[in-house]
Amino acid sequence: ALKRSRTILGRDFTDRVFQGLNPFTSDRRCLTVIYGYIVARHPGTYTFATNSYDASLFMVDGRTVTSWLGWHGPTWGSSKVHSGSIDLEKGTHAFFYVNATRSRGVLCSLGVKLPGAPRLVLAPPSFFVRWTRAFPSRYATLDKRPLAWFSWRWTSDLGLSGKPVTAVQFKDLSGVPLSRRRGDFWDFGDGTTSRSRDPAHVFLEAGVFPVTHVVYTSDGRKYSLTQRVFVHPKGTPGWRIYQDVKNFAKILRSYNPARLSPGALASAVFVFRAARDYDGALPFLYTLIRKSLNMDKGGLAGEAFFLAGELLAKRRDYKGALEILEGIRKGTKSLRVSLKAAVLMADILYENMGDVPRARALLEEVIRKEKGRGDDTLRFALIKKADLLLEAGDRKRARALLEEAAAMKRRGAFLGEEEASAGEHMTAYEEYAGRKDYASAMKELRAWEWDAPLDKLTGLLRYLKADLYVRLGMPAEALREIERMEKAAPESPDLPAALIMAAQCDLALGKKAEARKCLERIIRDFPVSEARPEAEKRLKALEKGSARKTR
């Protein structure tokens, strides 16, 4: 397998056989090969044990000592590991360890039981022939010219999160005194630059980068040096990761997405998402989608779904959300992911943009391809298709679809909400709306229709959504919801109150004649409703205002 492999992801030194991540890429399908020398300080029988995700093998002096083949998870406890013994003479011996992982990620370790020792222990660094890196810290020329020079050190990374994101601190070591210095320029070899003297930089991919440092002097000269910097994550402790991603996100804000590779863009989206900096993530995600990369890699589709939802909830950026969802459809080979994106696109097109033909086409595609699978995507598509039928006045077919959706067994929280009753949803909605958290209130209505599809026939969900739009200062959208409410539930007890709201929206849009019709209709068609006195009051005020203008 090693000989047939066409791609070498990277090489580095390690002080022991103990790996918990792939330091060179987020790809989990790989071979990890560790080789070197062990030190047998006493002759005798040595027992070695391997523990790993998926297949592993350990050899000494060309002989297999122990192996654990096949696809499997690790074991817990030294009594359950796969072990073998070998007699070794005093001295150094070549070893070879390989771990082949298919989908779970790299996780492997080597245990050893020394001659006369009571038990197996994790093979410590002192058991292996040690190594060290050496590189010059500074150099000089015979004529004592000042030269550009710099060093660097690893500070933290996201390797334990499965992302090849590494922070490196660079330090200027040039011999140019500050009195002669005019400025600095750094090119990190990954499409990004800096003009700081000692920059902190975040590399979004693993690899070897040609980093160039240029020092400008007051006499118009410049001195530059390029060094090859080997970058890969080492595994920052988990308790530091949240603070690290917040710092990483601040640095990434200065990056130009157009100059980054698709892999770097994907890592940047993850960093911003982990730091909850959704505004920062969007330019990188848009650029990524326009470069048409694989959305199935590294959980990127899940990140994109979340950010599309953020656009809807907080920005009401419908075109942006559609672009993200269309990018998911183009960039995935998964039918399930593609259809989920399609049904969410249909939801936006109908609910927020009023594009019924495009919404209908997408829903019919989803229902056709999902029929018989019983997936949550089909459940949501049936609910949305029922909305189209209600708007067309076909309540009988709409009810049938909603009953079918309600009878389906939920496979998971499609909208990211736990199942709740209508009363619980109403309480949560009123709480959010009362504290002016309208984005959460809108999400609550979406969760309500997901949990109780048949409640759409009452018209209450449309009424509450119209009320939210009024509070948000969006009268046109509120009128659209009231119109849909009446088509869904023409005998709803909330209709008189909705007509009061419609008159208010018409006045906000300068449509006094339409407002008058709404108020007159309440007085005529709902003579005993609680809304009639309010309608009469508003109609009188409207007529009084018109009379004053006429005079």
Image (cartoon, rainbow, N blue to C red):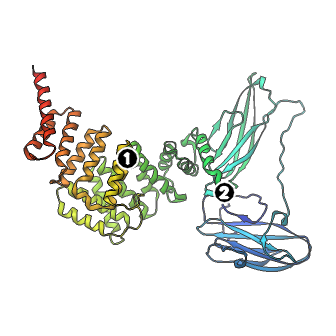
| 343, 495: nearer the viewer | 495
Q: Which disc is residue 220 wearing? A: none
How far is mark 1 from mark 2, CA to CA? 45 Å
Q: Which x, y percent locates residue 473?
A: 30, 37
Q: Which residue is mark 2?
A: 24
Q: Nearer the viewer, mark 1 or mark 2?
A: 1
Report the residue at 75% width, 74% height from top.
58
Position of 277 relative to 65 (above/below): above
Judging by the rendered image, the residue that carries numbered circle 1 is 432
Q: Count the marks: how many?
A: 2
Ranked by sequence position, the earlier of labels 1 and 2 is: 2
- Residue 227 visible to an observer of this rendering: yes
Classify the position of the C terminus by image quarter: top left
Answer left or right for 44 relative to 490. right
Local packing at callout 2 (Cα closer than 10 Å; few below 14, some 14-19, many 20+) is: many
Q: Residue furthest top?
A: 551
Residue 463, relative to residue 91: is it above or below? above
Task: Determine the secondary structure under disc 1.
Answer: helix
Amino acid at dot 1: Tyr
Residue type indicated by callout 2: Phe
- Left or right of 279? Residue 14 is right
Q: Residue at x 72, y 48 (%)?
A: 154
Image quarter (top left, top right, bottom left or bottom right) of the N terminus:
bottom right
Residue 140, picture quadrant: top right
User: How far from the left and from the top, in percent, is residue 538?
Assistant: 15, 34
Q: Position of residue 437 (x, y in %)?
A: 39, 44
